[in-house]
Image: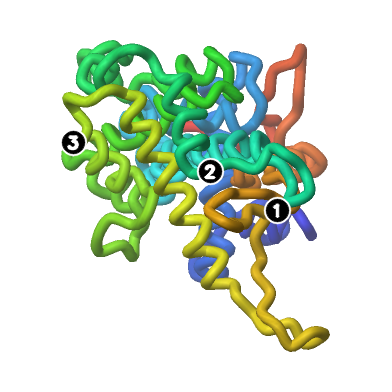
């Protein structure tokens, strides 16, 4: 029964699109994309999410493979997986910034200038233009997307400048013409009409403004933007505390006498895509399996999900 629900099939593994709701068809499409990604890249030994990235986010298989190219949701997942790098970079940068701030009772409170210096001092001694030129190519000779984000992360995900570089790559990928229109729509957000705070086009605007200035100057500006966004979010969540009648601010970072202190640390883990969980469920249902540390699609999985060309 659970297999039928997850794969939008009737008894015997037959899928009739008209018999299912749009959400069921989308869930099936995601499983098919993951299954086909495993067929193509499961031998590389990555987990479910990285296997999906290998086949969908990078390379040319998303548009040339006879299965992936026929699934409309493939473009959406490509946009999501590429945007995920920028989201993760912001989370790690913010968590690292907050980690360096002390509590209200300690001596490690920080001014905005000290926080700007914290990140700027870790920047390379180069201008933004040269730093962009030093990045590996984002596309291959045939126009396929290259896994630059993976190369940068290999330098150390917790290094602040690693995450600044990831934000810069996300900004370059946001430029018109870099991604197919349907992928770019998801990468930027379907409902957006203009640049949003801290999104890839926001960062791209900063890159243009700071192109001939030091990377440290750009890094300092990113700190200012993070602090401003933190305040915007805190004010949006402002509520009256029924116990005291006063205002309650839901934030871990607070400002007092022009100095920042924290009431707790921020998480730096990536926002979940639910792909690992989906792969695990499919594994339990006998659709996927793991052999010699590599993922494979079972014969039953290929039949039900129709992953063969």
Helix, strand or loop status at disc 1: loop
Helix, strand or loop status at disc 2: loop
Dot 2 or dot 1: first in sequence order is: 1
Residue 208: mark: 3
Camera-nearest label, 1 or 3: 3
CB within 8 Å, label 1 to label 3: no
In three-dimensional space, the C-alpha distance between marks 2 and 3, rounded to whole angstroms, equals: 27 Å
Residue that mark 2 sits on:
111
Res 208 quadrant in image: top left
Give the residue at x 46% y 18%.
152
Percent position (x, y) of residue 159?
56, 21
Dot 1 or dot 3: first in sequence order is: 1
Give the residue at x 22% y 25%.
213
Report whether residue 216 is seen.
yes
Side of 152 relative to 259 (left or right): left
Give the residue at x 79% y 84%.
244
CB within 8 Å, label 2 to label 1: no
Side of 56 relative to 191 (left or right): right
Q: Quadrant of the C terminus?
A: top left
Dot 1 alpha-carbon crowd within 10 angstroms: few under 14, some 14 to 19, many 20 or more: few
Residue 12: mark: 1
């Amino acid at each position: 029964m659970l297999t039928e629900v997850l794969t939008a099939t009737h008894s015997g593994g037959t899928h009739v699109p008209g018999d299912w709701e749009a959400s069921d068809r989308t869930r099936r499409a995601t499983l098919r994309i993951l299954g086909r990604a495993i067929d193509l890249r499961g031998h590389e030994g990555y987990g479910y999410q990285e296997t999906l990235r290998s086949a969908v986010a990078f390379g040319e298989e998303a548009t040339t493979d006879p299965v992936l190219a026929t699934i409309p949701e493939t473009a959406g997942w490509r946009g999501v997986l590429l945007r995920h790098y920028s989201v993760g970079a912001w989370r790690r940068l913010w968590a690292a910034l907050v980690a360096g701030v002390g509590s209200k009772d300690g001596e490690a409170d920080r001014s905005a200038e000290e926080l700007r210096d914290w990140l700027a001092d870790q920047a390379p001694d180069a201008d933004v233009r040269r730093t962009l030129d030093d990045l590996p190519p984002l596309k291959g000779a045939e126009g396929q997307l290259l896994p630059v984000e993976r190369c940068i992360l290999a330098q150390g995900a917790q290094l602040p400048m690693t995450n600044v570089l990831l934000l810069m790559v996300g900004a370059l990928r946001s430029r018109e013409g870099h991604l197919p229109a349907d992928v770019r729509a998801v990468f930027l957000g379907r409902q957006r009409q203009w640049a949003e705070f801290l999104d890839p086009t926001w960062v791209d605007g900063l890159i243009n403004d700071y192109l001939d200035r030091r990377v440290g100057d750009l890094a300092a500006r990113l700190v200012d933007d993070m602090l401003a966004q933190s305040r915007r979010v805190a004010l949006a969540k402002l509520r009256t505390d029924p116990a005291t009648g006063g205002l309650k601010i839901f934030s871990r970072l607070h400002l007092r006498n022009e100095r920042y202190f924290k009431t707790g640390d921020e998480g730096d883990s990536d926002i979940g895509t639910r792909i690992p969980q989906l792969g695990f469920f499919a594994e339990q249902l006998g659709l996927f399996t793991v052999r010699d540390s590599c993922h494979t699609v079972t014969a039953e999985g290929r039949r039900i999900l129709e992953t063969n060309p």
